[in-house]
Amino acid sequence: MTVLDDDQHIRRAMSEVSNEVARFSYALFGLDTHDRPDLYASCVLVECDGVGVLVTAAHAISAIEKGGRGIYLGAKHLTQVPGQFERSSKDGNDQLDIAAIVLPHDLLRQEEMEALPLSRTGFDRPLPDAHFRCVHGYPLSKNRQYKRLNDANKTFTRYHFTYAGVSPEPVNYQKFGKDTTFHVALRYRKGTNEKGNRGRPPFPKGVSGGGLWMIPGLFAAKDCYLEGIAIEYHNTHSLLFSTRIDHVVKFVRKYVHKG
């Protein structure tokens, strides 16, 4: 019988969490001037009242749209997102910074996409105390086009990344233009990687729109809950802010899918 130490338990739990949340997490692309895919941001597919809703950060959608070549979803294939995202503000300069769109059932089936049930989010329910939190997405520094793009057939292999940390107390949310009613802060700084080595995590640009997940315990890693959507990083203070899922779902029900 092998006895695991604390670090091994943590690494095993993180591997389980990463595999689990990756089922519902995807990358968003634009096209460059040569019509090659260019990764911009992350997103999460959530089941809301019987439909699959793709949720991300509004500022990420605005950035892709400036290219004028459409918004593309990286799932089984690289597929153009049909229709228009509803955004909480044009450039994501509001409290929510959220964008969402309902995806057709045929697209979900074709791309073999899984939607996270609403029961596995922090919407309208008290969550257990967090043992730790993690953010999951597609950092641009690990998804550079020259490394990930097959120019011959314009396919793009994606690298996803999961970072676990703590929500520090106290944080002066007002200093960063944030509010605990709307937001959750996560420390994002040097730590131990999956190999047990100390190092800095990749710069989180590209993780915007990805999920903030709450994990109740090391031995309940798969019982993780979506707590928010990542929207903003403050490098000098190593803080990553996410919009709480309650407000995300309320936005979806009011403006995106009205049931």
Image (cartoon, rainbow, N blue to C red):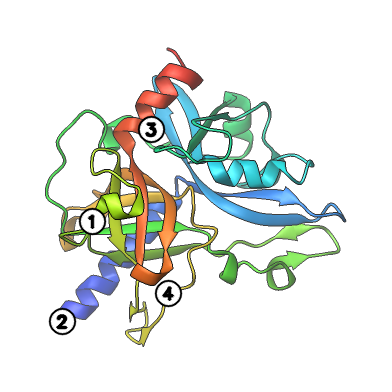
Q: Is residue 56 left or right of residue 38?
A: left
User: Residue 103 location, x and y as percent?
Assistant: 57, 28
**Disc 1 secondary structure class:** loop
Q: Residues within 10 Å of mark 3 (few under 14, many from 20)?
A: many
Name the residue at the top extreme.
Answer: 259
The N terminus: image quadrant = bottom left
Q: Label 3 amino acid?
A: Val
Q: Nearer the viewer, residue 70 or 110?
A: 70
User: Residue 139 location, x and y as percent?
Assistant: 53, 64
For marks 1 and 2 on the same chain, the one whose residue lies earlier in the sequence: 2
Do the residues bearing badges 2 and 4 touch, measured as CB atoms within 8 Å? no
Q: Residues within 10 Å of mark 1 (few under 14, many from 20)?
A: few
Residue designated by label 3 = 248
Name the residue at the front extreme.
Answer: 175
Q: Which mark is residue 201?
A: 4
Q: Label 2 amino acid?
A: Asp
| Between marks 3 and 2 in the image, the one whose residue lies nearer the viewer | 3
Calculate the distance from the C-alpha at mark 3 to the C-alpha at mark 1. 23 Å
The C terminus: image quadrant = top left
Residue at 37 percent across and 28 percent down: it is 249
User: Residue 142 location, x and y as percent?
Assistant: 57, 70
Residue designated by label 1 = 172
In the displayed structure, would residue 21 be above or below residue 101?
below
Q: Label 4 amino acid?
A: Pro
Name the residue at the bottom extreme.
Answer: 197
User: Residue 192 location, x and y as percent?
Assistant: 31, 80
Residue designated by label 2 = 5
Q: Label 1 amino acid?
A: Asn
| Between marks 4 and 1 in the image, the one whose residue lies nearer the viewer | 1
